[in-house]
Amino acid sequence: MSSATSERPSARHVAIIMDGNGRWATQRGKPRLFGHHAGAKRVREIVEACPNYGVKYLTIFGFSTENWKRTQTEVAGLMSLFRMYIRKEARELKRQGVRVRFIGDRIKLDKKLQELMDELEVMTEGNDKTHLTIALNYGGRDEVARATKRLAQDVADGKLSPDDVGEETLPKYLDTYVLPDPDLVIRTSGEARISNFLLWQSAYAEYEFIETLWPDFSEAVFADVLAGYGGRDRRYGGVKP
Protein backbone atom coordinates (compact mmCIF):
# COMPACT_ATOMS: atom_id res chain seq x y z
CA MET A 1 0.00 0.00 0.00
CA SER A 2 1.25 3.51 -0.78
CA SER A 3 1.76 6.13 1.87
CA ALA A 4 -0.75 8.91 2.40
CA THR A 5 0.15 11.94 0.33
CA SER A 6 0.64 15.44 1.66
CA GLU A 7 -2.01 16.78 -0.74
CA ARG A 8 -4.87 15.30 1.24
CA PRO A 9 -5.34 15.62 5.00
CA SER A 10 -4.54 12.45 6.90
CA ALA A 11 -6.16 11.25 10.10
CA ARG A 12 -3.41 11.58 12.69
CA HIS A 13 -5.47 9.88 15.39
CA VAL A 14 -7.85 7.06 14.47
CA ALA A 15 -10.11 5.38 17.02
CA ILE A 16 -11.80 2.06 16.22
CA ILE A 17 -14.79 0.29 17.74
CA MET A 18 -13.87 -3.27 16.78
CA ASP A 19 -17.29 -4.86 16.41
CA GLY A 20 -18.45 -8.08 14.82
CA ASN A 21 -16.13 -10.77 16.17
CA GLY A 22 -18.98 -12.87 17.55
CA ARG A 23 -21.08 -12.65 14.40
CA TRP A 24 -18.05 -13.48 12.26
CA ALA A 25 -17.52 -16.67 14.27
CA THR A 26 -21.21 -17.60 14.28
CA GLN A 27 -21.34 -17.31 10.48
CA ARG A 28 -18.63 -19.96 10.38
CA GLY A 29 -20.27 -22.26 12.90
CA LYS A 30 -17.64 -21.46 15.53
CA PRO A 31 -17.92 -20.26 19.15
CA ARG A 32 -17.75 -16.51 19.73
CA LEU A 33 -14.27 -16.73 21.25
CA PHE A 34 -12.99 -18.03 17.90
CA GLY A 35 -13.98 -14.67 16.46
CA HIS A 36 -12.27 -12.76 19.24
CA HIS A 37 -9.02 -14.61 18.54
CA ALA A 38 -9.35 -13.77 14.84
CA GLY A 39 -9.98 -10.15 15.76
CA ALA A 40 -6.87 -10.01 17.93
CA LYS A 41 -4.76 -11.13 14.96
CA ARG A 42 -6.28 -8.34 12.89
CA VAL A 43 -5.11 -5.77 15.41
CA ARG A 44 -1.48 -6.52 14.60
CA GLU A 45 -2.02 -5.90 10.87
CA ILE A 46 -3.70 -2.56 11.45
CA VAL A 47 -1.07 -1.40 13.96
CA GLU A 48 1.67 -2.25 11.48
CA ALA A 49 -0.17 -0.39 8.70
CA CYS A 50 -0.62 2.87 10.60
CA PRO A 51 2.73 4.50 9.68
CA ASN A 52 2.00 3.90 5.98
CA TYR A 53 -0.96 6.27 6.14
CA GLY A 54 0.22 8.97 8.50
CA VAL A 55 -1.66 7.55 11.49
CA LYS A 56 0.42 8.37 14.56
CA TYR A 57 -2.20 7.44 17.18
CA LEU A 58 -4.49 4.42 17.14
CA THR A 59 -7.03 3.84 19.91
CA ILE A 60 -9.00 0.59 19.96
CA PHE A 61 -12.00 -0.44 22.05
CA GLY A 62 -11.07 -3.79 23.58
CA PHE A 63 -13.59 -4.27 26.41
CA SER A 64 -16.29 -1.91 27.63
CA THR A 65 -17.76 -1.39 31.08
CA GLU A 66 -20.94 -2.93 29.66
CA ASN A 67 -19.22 -6.07 28.37
CA TRP A 68 -19.32 -7.62 31.85
CA LYS A 69 -22.96 -8.42 31.04
CA ARG A 70 -21.82 -11.13 28.62
CA THR A 71 -21.69 -14.77 29.66
CA GLN A 72 -19.10 -15.73 32.26
CA THR A 73 -17.48 -18.05 29.71
CA GLU A 74 -17.05 -15.28 27.14
CA VAL A 75 -15.76 -12.76 29.68
CA ALA A 76 -13.24 -15.25 31.10
CA GLY A 77 -12.17 -16.12 27.57
CA LEU A 78 -11.65 -12.46 26.69
CA MET A 79 -9.56 -11.84 29.81
CA SER A 80 -7.43 -14.86 28.93
CA LEU A 81 -7.07 -13.52 25.38
CA PHE A 82 -5.90 -10.12 26.63
CA ARG A 83 -3.25 -11.74 28.83
CA MET A 84 -2.11 -13.96 25.96
CA TYR A 85 -2.03 -11.05 23.50
CA ILE A 86 0.17 -8.95 25.77
CA ARG A 87 2.61 -11.80 26.41
CA LYS A 88 2.78 -12.73 22.72
CA GLU A 89 3.01 -9.25 21.20
CA ALA A 90 5.06 -7.32 23.77
CA ARG A 91 8.50 -7.77 22.20
CA GLU A 92 7.24 -7.20 18.66
CA LEU A 93 5.44 -4.01 19.68
CA LYS A 94 8.61 -2.73 21.31
CA ARG A 95 10.68 -3.67 18.23
CA GLN A 96 8.31 -1.83 15.90
CA GLY A 97 8.49 1.37 17.91
CA VAL A 98 4.92 1.14 19.22
CA ARG A 99 4.13 2.84 22.51
CA VAL A 100 1.26 1.13 24.30
CA ARG A 101 -1.11 2.74 26.78
CA PHE A 102 -4.25 1.41 28.45
CA ILE A 103 -7.29 3.47 29.37
CA GLY A 104 -10.27 2.51 31.48
CA ASP A 105 -10.82 1.46 35.09
CA ARG A 106 -8.13 -1.19 35.36
CA ILE A 107 -8.75 -1.71 39.10
CA LYS A 108 -11.66 -3.99 38.22
CA LEU A 109 -9.48 -6.24 36.05
CA ASP A 110 -7.69 -9.27 37.49
CA LYS A 111 -4.33 -8.66 39.12
CA LYS A 112 -2.25 -10.62 36.62
CA LEU A 113 -3.71 -8.70 33.70
CA GLN A 114 -3.05 -5.43 35.51
CA GLU A 115 0.59 -6.45 36.03
CA LEU A 116 1.00 -7.31 32.35
CA MET A 117 -0.55 -4.01 31.33
CA ASP A 118 1.81 -2.08 33.61
CA GLU A 119 4.83 -4.01 32.30
CA LEU A 120 3.93 -3.39 28.65
CA GLU A 121 3.45 0.33 29.25
CA VAL A 122 6.86 0.57 30.92
CA MET A 123 8.53 -1.61 28.26
CA THR A 124 7.31 0.60 25.41
CA GLU A 125 7.37 4.03 27.05
CA GLY A 126 10.41 5.11 25.04
CA ASN A 127 8.76 4.38 21.67
CA ASP A 128 7.26 7.09 19.47
CA LYS A 129 6.61 5.67 16.01
CA THR A 130 3.01 4.64 16.71
CA HIS A 131 0.97 5.26 19.84
CA LEU A 132 -1.42 2.38 20.48
CA THR A 133 -4.05 2.96 23.16
CA ILE A 134 -6.16 0.00 24.26
CA ALA A 135 -9.42 0.65 26.09
CA LEU A 136 -10.08 -2.11 28.64
CA ASN A 137 -13.00 -1.92 31.05
CA TYR A 138 -13.61 1.46 29.49
CA GLY A 139 -16.77 3.54 29.20
CA GLY A 140 -16.98 7.17 28.20
CA ARG A 141 -19.45 8.10 30.92
CA ASP A 142 -17.41 6.23 33.52
CA GLU A 143 -14.28 8.05 32.40
CA VAL A 144 -15.97 11.46 32.67
CA ALA A 145 -17.38 10.54 36.09
CA ARG A 146 -13.95 9.47 37.37
CA ALA A 147 -12.35 12.60 35.92
CA THR A 148 -14.99 14.84 37.51
CA LYS A 149 -14.43 13.19 40.88
CA ARG A 150 -10.68 13.87 40.68
CA LEU A 151 -11.32 17.45 39.58
CA ALA A 152 -13.79 18.00 42.43
CA GLN A 153 -11.27 16.64 44.92
CA ASP A 154 -8.64 19.10 43.69
CA VAL A 155 -11.14 21.93 44.14
CA ALA A 156 -11.98 20.69 47.64
CA ASP A 157 -8.27 20.49 48.50
CA GLY A 158 -7.70 24.05 47.29
CA LYS A 159 -5.47 22.97 44.39
CA LEU A 160 -7.92 24.39 41.88
CA SER A 161 -10.31 27.32 42.07
CA PRO A 162 -13.91 26.77 40.86
CA ASP A 163 -13.48 29.91 38.74
CA ASP A 164 -10.63 28.20 36.89
CA VAL A 165 -12.77 25.24 35.80
CA GLY A 166 -13.67 25.49 32.12
CA GLU A 167 -13.82 23.51 28.91
CA GLU A 168 -10.05 23.12 28.87
CA THR A 169 -9.87 21.83 32.45
CA LEU A 170 -11.68 18.49 32.39
CA PRO A 171 -9.56 16.94 29.58
CA LYS A 172 -6.54 17.15 31.88
CA TYR A 173 -8.28 14.64 34.19
CA LEU A 174 -9.37 12.19 31.48
CA ASP A 175 -7.60 8.87 30.85
CA THR A 176 -6.49 10.26 27.47
CA TYR A 177 -4.96 13.49 28.81
CA VAL A 178 -1.67 12.92 26.96
CA LEU A 179 -3.33 12.13 23.61
CA PRO A 180 -4.74 14.38 20.90
CA ASP A 181 -8.45 14.07 20.22
CA PRO A 182 -9.34 11.53 17.51
CA ASP A 183 -9.77 12.83 13.98
CA LEU A 184 -11.67 9.77 12.80
CA VAL A 185 -13.74 7.14 14.61
CA ILE A 186 -14.46 3.90 12.75
CA ARG A 187 -17.04 1.33 13.77
CA THR A 188 -17.13 -2.01 12.03
CA SER A 189 -20.01 -4.52 11.55
CA GLY A 190 -22.71 -2.15 10.35
CA GLU A 191 -23.86 -0.83 13.72
CA ALA A 192 -24.36 2.95 13.66
CA ARG A 193 -23.81 3.90 17.30
CA ILE A 194 -20.84 5.03 19.36
CA SER A 195 -21.43 2.76 22.37
CA ASN A 196 -20.09 5.06 25.07
CA PHE A 197 -16.66 5.37 23.42
CA LEU A 198 -14.52 8.52 23.82
CA LEU A 199 -17.57 10.72 24.35
CA TRP A 200 -15.73 13.91 25.26
CA GLN A 201 -12.77 13.42 22.95
CA SER A 202 -14.81 12.73 19.80
CA ALA A 203 -16.89 15.91 19.87
CA TYR A 204 -15.44 17.00 16.51
CA ALA A 205 -14.32 13.66 15.11
CA GLU A 206 -15.48 12.35 11.76
CA TYR A 207 -17.35 9.03 11.97
CA GLU A 208 -17.33 6.11 9.56
CA PHE A 209 -19.71 3.19 10.08
CA ILE A 210 -18.87 0.28 7.79
CA GLU A 211 -20.45 -3.12 7.18
CA THR A 212 -17.19 -5.07 7.39
CA LEU A 213 -16.90 -7.32 10.46
CA TRP A 214 -13.75 -6.64 12.45
CA PRO A 215 -11.92 -9.92 11.61
CA ASP A 216 -12.32 -8.97 7.92
CA PHE A 217 -11.05 -5.41 8.44
CA SER A 218 -7.90 -5.66 6.32
CA GLU A 219 -5.31 -3.03 5.51
CA ALA A 220 -7.05 -2.51 2.17
CA VAL A 221 -10.33 -1.67 3.94
CA PHE A 222 -8.44 0.60 6.33
CA ALA A 223 -6.84 2.40 3.39
CA ASP A 224 -10.21 2.96 1.73
CA VAL A 225 -11.70 4.46 4.90
CA LEU A 226 -8.69 6.74 5.36
CA ALA A 227 -8.90 7.85 1.73
CA GLY A 228 -12.53 8.77 2.28
CA TYR A 229 -11.55 10.81 5.32
CA GLY A 230 -8.97 12.66 3.23
CA GLY A 231 -11.75 13.91 0.97
CA ARG A 232 -13.86 15.38 3.77
CA ASP A 233 -14.11 19.11 4.44
CA ARG A 234 -13.61 19.72 8.15
CA ARG A 235 -14.72 23.23 9.25
CA TYR A 236 -15.21 22.76 13.03
CA GLY A 237 -18.32 24.90 13.00
CA GLY A 238 -16.81 27.62 10.84
CA VAL A 239 -17.17 28.52 7.17
CA LYS A 240 -14.29 28.61 4.75
CA PRO A 241 -13.82 31.95 2.99
Image (spheres, helix red, strand yellow):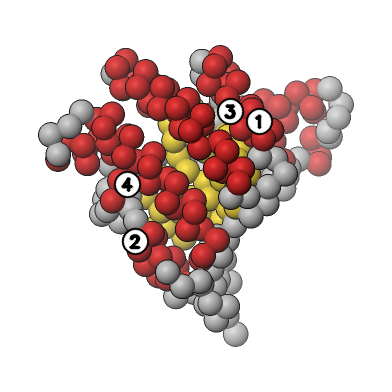
In this rendering, would 141 be left or right of 207?
right
Q: Amino acid at mark 3?
A: Met
In the displayed structure, 41 sits above or below 202; it is: above
Which class describes the residues within 10 Å of circle 1: few (<14), some (14-19), or many (20+)? some
Residue 22, image x, y percentages: 25, 35
Numbered marks: total: 4
Q: In the rendered structure, which amino acid carries the disc numbered 2?
A: Val
Where is residue 164 drawn, in percent x and y?
81, 41
* Residue name at image x 45 percent, y 46 percent: 44
Q: Which mark is residue 1?
A: none
Q: Secondary structure at mark 2?
A: helix
- Give the Cα separation between the discs numbered 2 and 4: 10 Å
Of 219 and 160, nearer the camera is 219
**Residue linked to disc 4:** 214
Q: Nearer the viewer, residue 31 or 199?
A: 31
Helix, strand or loop for disc 3: helix
Quarter of image, res 30: top left
Q: Is residue 157 above or below residue 231?
A: above
Report which residue position mark 2 lands on: 221
Task: Decide if residue 55 is on the left or right side of residue 71.
Answer: right
- Pick the quarter of the image with the N terminus: bottom left
Front of the two marks 2 and 1:
2
Amino acid found under the numbered disc labelled 1: Thr
First in sequence: mark 2 or mark 1? 1
C-alpha span from label 4 to label 3:
23 Å
Label 1: element kind: helix
| Label 1 sits on residue | 148
